[in-house]
């Protein structure tokens, strides 16, 4: 898998492409942390959505992708940490946002949880990797691009106190 480093100049076109696809009123954006905070905020601004929520998720990588594809028992489901109260999603049109859909485990887990809370749930990502997707009958409702590369987004660069102080 090849790394592809995206500059900030390529982010606005992805947002525009997603915004053009979304053909319904979104009442709430549920952003996956990590990965969906910046894309979710940008989509919220573009769509005029003020109800923003965060789902904290930890995707485990105990097993190799090829082993997961050949033996579904080996699929490691993500751990969902902080999640909005069911009442905040019930009866609302909810857009779950992440930066990418690789195996599909993280977005699918949050989609199931939000749907169980009574939300009318849709998913949106910047990049969809159909080759790595573990669910043949499932894909994001909205996506801006298809890729088989590992995308490195501009907000994922080396930043922060450790980097500045040379402790990285």
Image: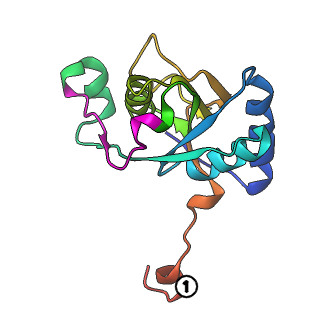
- Mark 1 lies on a secondary structure that is helix
Q: Residue at x 73, y 25 (%)?
A: 22
Q: Residue at x 36, y 50 (%)?
A: 82
The verdict on residue 11 being magenta is: no
Indicate the quadrant where residue 118 lies: top left
Q: Residue 30 location, x and y as percent?
A: 54, 40
Region rendered in magenta: 74-87
- The one nearer the camera, 58 or 159, is 58
Q: Quadrant of the C terminus?
A: bottom left
Q: Residue at x 75, y 56 (%)?
A: 8
Q: Residue 11 location, x and y as percent?
A: 74, 47
Q: Is residue 23 left or right of residue 126?
A: right
Q: Which residue is mark 1?
A: 164
Q: Residue 139 location, x and y as percent?
A: 52, 19
- The one nearer the camera, 11 or 67, is 11
Q: Residue 142 location, x and y as percent?
A: 65, 25
Mark 1 Cα within 10 Å, few/some/many (few <14, many 20+)? Answer: few
141 vs 29: above or below? above
């Amino acid at each position: 898998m090849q790394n592809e480093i995206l500059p900030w100049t390529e982010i606005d076109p992805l947002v525009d492409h997603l915004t053009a696809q979304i053909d319904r009123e979104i009442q709430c954006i549920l952003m996956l942390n990590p990965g969906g905070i910046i894309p979710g905020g940008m989509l919220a601004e573009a769509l005029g959505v003020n109800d923003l929520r965060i789902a904290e998720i930890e995707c485990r990588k105990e097993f190799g992708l090829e082993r997961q594809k050949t033996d579904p028992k080996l699929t490691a489901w993500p751990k969902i940490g902080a999640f909005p109260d069911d009442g905040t999603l019930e009866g609302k049109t909810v857009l779950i946002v992440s930066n990418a859909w690789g195996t599909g485990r993280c977005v699918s887990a949050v989609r199931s949880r939000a749907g169980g809370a009574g939300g009318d749930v849709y998913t949106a990502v910047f990049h969809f990797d159909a080759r790595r997707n573990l669910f043949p009958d499932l894909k994001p409702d909205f996506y801006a691009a298809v890729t088989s590369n590992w995308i490195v987004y501009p907000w994922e660069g080396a930043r922060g106190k450790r980097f500045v102080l040379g402790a990285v």
